[in-house]
């Protein structure tokens, strides 16, 4: 690992996208990109793996579905069966029509909340968490690539200038660690 | 540029010569400038109404539900009317943010934030009514599936009232996390430009340390899409379940299979009307005319017109089915609604909800801001009367003519209702001065495709 990295600022999403494609082509490793809004195609351009969030959510939904059925089965059928106006309600299969609304609600409840919690934990989002974007303008209108310097800094710099970077800053990582 | 192509026939959704930074400035302005006198006057009036409502609630809880105008025949009146009215209003927010996201409607981006805020604030108002009506709100935990202290008797999962507890609490919490997740990048924007240390601290805290990494955005977009997919059936289920409170009973006038779709359409109708009322004022006061354009207002008016027509259809279907069923109790219930002592409420409901939105067929009217504002108020009044008509006229003349009676609200009934309107506006006014009221990070994504300046640039080529 080289001890230096570059912070390259851009002021347009289309220029950024083209630049990222070029940087990836020239085999220089991109540590991170900070943008003020989702830039479509950026994840593919920097070869990020697709997220598994929706698969996780499906599993969470299944958990909610199961919990709801088990809870109502225990409460209404096993623990305390009730005769409600003589209606057939003494087995799960007989009583399940009136459990449908709550089964649905609990499926959504589990899926939605567990998904959001997973998202917050994986992306390190919680109260009192300090923001990590190196430049405050990356939540406004600037785009920042945090990347390796490549073998020849000067050459990388000229390439980035040509790609439309508005500022290039060399960051010395060793100093940060001290 | 070519990747941002949008048909020239589509009207721009961001007016004026805006850059990304201009959007930031425009959205941050209401937060960074002190409120003016008008805001304080509006806040003062809302706060006074809220405090009046708090007084009435305390009196109700201290003395009992007997302080309301309810009687032996009409056991449900303003409380449940207000509950359904507020829940209904709370439907537009999630509809705008979820359903319109699934349909890839770009015009949702100017209005979704405020619509969701309105949803959350109005569901809070709705939630107050069942709690107050319990009479002993400190026993609220009896709603939850725990065995009570008299043995192991549980809540009854066969009761629509319990389904409502689950539906409303799921809806409120899911809407809240949907809203807050969308807010994170916008709070981060305010945080990163804040100059006052206290402001910086607060926005750092509530932005959860959002940094805008590429991976975060990838997850963010996936989470938004999946949440929208979950919230869409959820929003339809909530008012369906609210309508079950009535539809599963045996009261003529309530016992109808048409209730779920009819209630859902009515909810969207009244919700959009409330969004219209609030945003027409807000776009002017917070100078957001570039983001909440006449095009947005027209789109919302079209939704109001269509859902109003669905509601109208439902009213007429109800009448027809009452006659066609041959059940004389059902027939009397509807005859009594239209021609009985509450005919004036039925007339108000019909004229406000069925007739008034039909003027939106005229382009001149649905693109006129004054007309849109007036109609939105009329619709809200009409939808309150719809619930009043359904609830009170079905009850006040029941099977025994000797117990026929009328309902008249006491000043406590009225006070609590006014209090919730005050509370709603207190929350909304505070929101308008401290939250980014337009989802700026989302608007920035459509600037190049739907911004007026970029559209013009493309046309020239």
Image: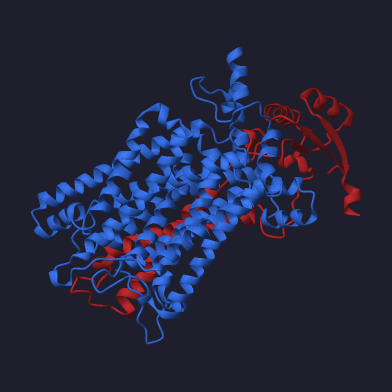
- The residue at the far top in this view is B461
At x 58% / y 34%, what residue is drawn? B289
Total numbered badges shown on the rendered structure: 0
Q: Is residue B65 above or below residue A159?
A: below
Where is residue B374? Give x, y as percent: 43, 41
Where is residue B338? Give x, y as percent: 20, 51
At x 51% / y 51%, what residue is drawn? B118
Q: Quadrant of the C terminus of chain B?
A: top right
Q: Quadrant of residue B285?
A: top right
- The residue at the far bottom in this view is B150
Chain in red colour = A
Residue A119 can be seen in this image: no
At x 76% / y 53%, what residue is drawn? B200
Q: Is residue B461 left or right of residue B298?
A: right
Coloring basis for residues: by chain
Q: Quadrant of the N terminus of chain B?
A: top right
At x 26% / y 52%, what residue is drawn? B344
Q: Is residue B303 left or right of residue B286?
A: left
In front here: B345 or A44? B345
Where is residue B10? Give x, y as percent: 49, 24
In front here: B136 or B157? B136
Chain in blue colour = B
Q: Is residue B150 left or right of residue B212?
A: left
Residue A162 can be seen in this image: yes
Q: Is residue B27 above or below residue B426?
A: above
Q: Is residue B170 above or below residue B357?
A: below
Q: Is residue B165 left or right of residue B393?
A: right
Q: Quadrant of residue B21?
A: top right
Q: Quadrant of residue B132?
A: bottom left
Where is residue B159? Give x, y as percent: 30, 68
């Amino acid at each position: 690992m080289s001890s230096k990295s570059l912070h390259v600022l851009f002021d347009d999403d289309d220029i950024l996208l083209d630049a990222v494609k070029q940087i990836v082509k020239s085999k220089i490793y991109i540590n991170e990109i900070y943008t003020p809004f989702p830039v479509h195609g950026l994840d593919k351009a920097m070869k990020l793996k697709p997220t598994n969030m929706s698969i996780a959510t499906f599993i969470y939904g299944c958990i909610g579905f199961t919990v709801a059925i088990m809870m109502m089965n225990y409460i209404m059928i096993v623990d305390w069966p009730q005769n409600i106006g003589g209606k057939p309600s003494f087995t799960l299969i007989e009583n399940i029509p009136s459990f449908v609304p709550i089964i649905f609600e609990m499926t959504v409840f589990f899926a939605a909340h567990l998904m959001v919690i997973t998202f917050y934990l994986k992306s390190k989002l919680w109260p009192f968490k300090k923001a990590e974007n190196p430049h405050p303008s990356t939540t406004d209108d600037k785009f920042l690539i945090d990347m390796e310097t490549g073998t020849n800094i000067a050459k990388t710099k000229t390439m980035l200038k040509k790609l439309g970077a508005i500022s290039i800053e060399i960051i010395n990582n060793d100093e940060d660690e001290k | 540029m070519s990747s941002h192509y949008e048909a020239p026939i589509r009207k721009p959704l961001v007016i004026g010569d805006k850059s990304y930074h201009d959007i930031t400035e425009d959205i941050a302005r209401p937060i960074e400038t002190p409120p003016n006198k008008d805001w304080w006057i509006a806040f003062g009036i809302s706060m006074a109404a809220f405090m009046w409502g708090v007084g009435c609630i305390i009196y109700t809880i201290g003395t009992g539900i007997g302080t309301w105008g309810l009687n032996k025949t009409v056991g449900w009146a303003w409380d449940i009317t207000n509950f359904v009215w507020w829940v209904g209003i709370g439907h537009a927010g999630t509809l705008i943010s979820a359903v319109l996201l699934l349909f890839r409607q770009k015009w949702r981006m100017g209005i979704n934030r405020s619509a969701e805020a309105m949803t959350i604030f109005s569901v809070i108002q709705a939630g107050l009514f069942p709690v107050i009506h319990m009479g002993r709100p400190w026993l609220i935990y009896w709603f939850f599936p725990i065995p009570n202290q008299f043995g192991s008797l549980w809540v009854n999962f066969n009761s629509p009232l319990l389904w409502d507890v689950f539906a409303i609490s799921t809806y409120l919490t899911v809407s809240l996390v949907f809203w807050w997740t969308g807010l994170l990048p916008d709070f981060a924007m305010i945080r990163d430009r804040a100059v006052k240390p206290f402001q910086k601290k607060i926005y750092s805290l509530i932005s959860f340390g959002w940094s805008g990494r590429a991976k975060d955005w990838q997850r963010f977009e996936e989470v938004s899409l999946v949440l929208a997919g979950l919230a869409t059936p959820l929003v339809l289920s909530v008012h369906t379940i609210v309508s079950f409170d009535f539809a599963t009973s045996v009261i003529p006038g309530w016992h109808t299979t048409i209730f779920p779709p009819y209630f859902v359409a009515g909810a969207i109708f009244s919700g959009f009307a409330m969004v219209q009322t609030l945003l027409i004022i807000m776009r002017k006061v917070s100078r957001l005319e570039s983001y909440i354009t006449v095009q947005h207002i027209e789109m919302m008016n079209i939704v109001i017109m269509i859902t109003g027509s669905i509601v109208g259809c439902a009213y007429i279907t109800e009448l027809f089915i009452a006659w066609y069923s041959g059940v004389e109790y059902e027939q009397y219930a509807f005859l009594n609604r239209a021609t009985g002592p509450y005919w004036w409420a039925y007339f108000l409901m019909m004229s406000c909800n069925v007739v008034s939105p039909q003027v939106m067929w005229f382009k001149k009217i649905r693109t006129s801001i004054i007309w849109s504002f007036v109609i939105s108020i009329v619709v809200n009044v009409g939808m309150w009367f719809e619930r009043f008509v359904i609830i009170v006229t079905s009850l006040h003349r029941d099977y025994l003519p000797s117990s026929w009676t009328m309902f008249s609200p006491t000043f406590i009934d009225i006070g609590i209702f006014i209090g919730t309107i005050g509370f709603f506006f207190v929350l909304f006014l505070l929101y308008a001065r401290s939250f980014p009221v337009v989802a700026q990070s989302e608007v920035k994504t459509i600037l190049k495709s739907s911004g007026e300046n970029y559209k013009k640039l493309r046309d020239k080529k």
